[in-house]
Image (tube, grey):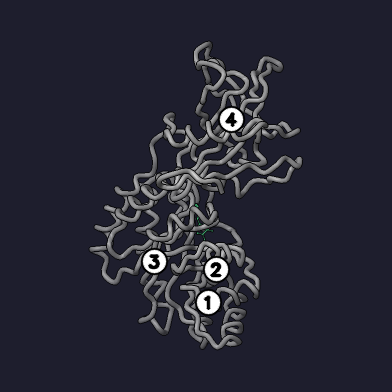
Amino acid sequence: MTELPVRVVAAIAQARQQQDDPLAMFIYDLAALQQHIRQVMEALPDGAELYYAIKANSEPQILQTLAPWVDGFEISSGGEIERLQAAGSDKPFVFSGPGKLDSDLRAALRRQAAAIHVESLNEIDRLQRLAREQGRVQTVLIRINPQLPAQISSRLAMAGTATPFGIDEADLAVAVHRVDNADHLVLQGFHVHAMSHQQSEQRHRQLMEYYLQRWPQWKALSAQQEGITHLNVGGGIGVDYLSTSQFDWPGFCHWLGELLAVTAGAPRLRFEPGRFISAFCGYYAIEILDQKTSHGKHFLVCRGGTHQFRLPVAQGHDHPIIHLPQRSDGAGELCAWTVVGQLCTPKDVLSRDCSLKGVAIGDMLVLPLAGAYGYNISHADFLCHPRPCQLFLPLETASWA
Ligand SMILES: *Cc1c(COP(=O)(O)O)cnc(C)c1O
């Protein structure tokens, strides 16, 4: 993780030359993204497919790079349907999320969503009415909030506890019955997105085993079981921001392939990760504006901050930092720095007590793993700083977005 790709370093150098003010920018290495998604897709076992959850990063260049490789996209708003369209994707998409508007649902029906994940009894009724208005029959998955055994919960549980997502397993029979009786809806299966930040393959395996064990019972609730073929097991594969070891996706997929092969009547499994797909290709590069010591703590004040890259504060971690000397030679004393941005709030901290050697004003700091839930979850207009440039490095040469 301490190694920066040469093309990223070169892009930063070029951007510095083209700008008078100190630099803050995002760089996305599309070649690395392509290589990663190839490996992720190649590892998938027979009987499983993968849709990219675009809320992690829905920039057109990201979607265009992923589109040839993924089976489809997962979206959660009408705006995200437009993003897909703007990117020119003709890949299938599925639509989840609480609080879908009628206008969102109409757009999804018109654009022939591969599945709409219904999240409440009211939504089933509403979708039936809207589908009838358009004279369409829509494929749906019922999103389940399952009763999860305690040992398979994780840092942020999206299910297995009180949440606004999906339909409680206790109410599933009623929901299935209602879809069965809706003549403009066809039940194709179930959707469970229970986890975020899952870093343990072991626990993710337990989760899959649990879903597959529940599957026949969920399916048996329907009077029309032949059409019930799909189990969307959500996203939530974690990224370890603090070490170099990552979720062993190939190992997990290998295990899953063996499990599916011996599971009678196994559903078609659909994954919809976001973070694990786009996180690794992104970098946030910031220039050091000032250094100071206050009450015994050493601060590096940098261009940009948490209004452009909220991820570290959102997750409460100290983001890894790579020092890119420009004015200094990178020699000198090791010092523990707290890296902050330009905002007038003590919360504008990107990393605390980060050990760096010989830093100087004008040097660059680069925050890797910034490609998912980075810029797009940030409050970029706070304090009216200009928005940072987002640079997408394509396979051959760099181009400005
Ligand atoms: C956010 C979300 C995802 C993607 O989650 P990641 O943690 O980024 O993998 C997938 N499915 C649903 C329904 C989501 O809300």
Helix, strand or loop under label 2 = strand
Q: Earlier in the sequence, mark 2 or mark 3?
A: 2
Q: Earlier in the sequence, mark 1 or mark 3?
A: 1
* Badge nearest the viewer, 4 or 1: 4
Where is residue 162, by image quadrant?
A: bottom right
Question: Circle 1: is it few (<14), some (14-19), or many (20+) Cα within 10 Å?
Answer: many
Residue holding disc 4: 351
Horizontal relation, residue 382 to residue 188: left or right: right
Which tag, 4 or 1, sits closer to the chain's start? 1
Question: Is there a contact, CB below 8 Å, between mark 4 and mark 2?
Answer: no
292 or 327: which is nearer to us? Answer: 327
Residue in the foreground of this view, choosing between 288 and 45 = 288
Q: Amino acid at mark 3?
A: Arg
- Residue 48, relative to residue 298: is it above or below? below
Give the residue number, with chain letter if any, for mark 2.
Answer: 167
Labelled pair 4, 1 in contact (Cβ < 8 Å): no
Between disc 4 and disc 3, the foreground one is 4
The residue at 50%/36% (across/down) is 11
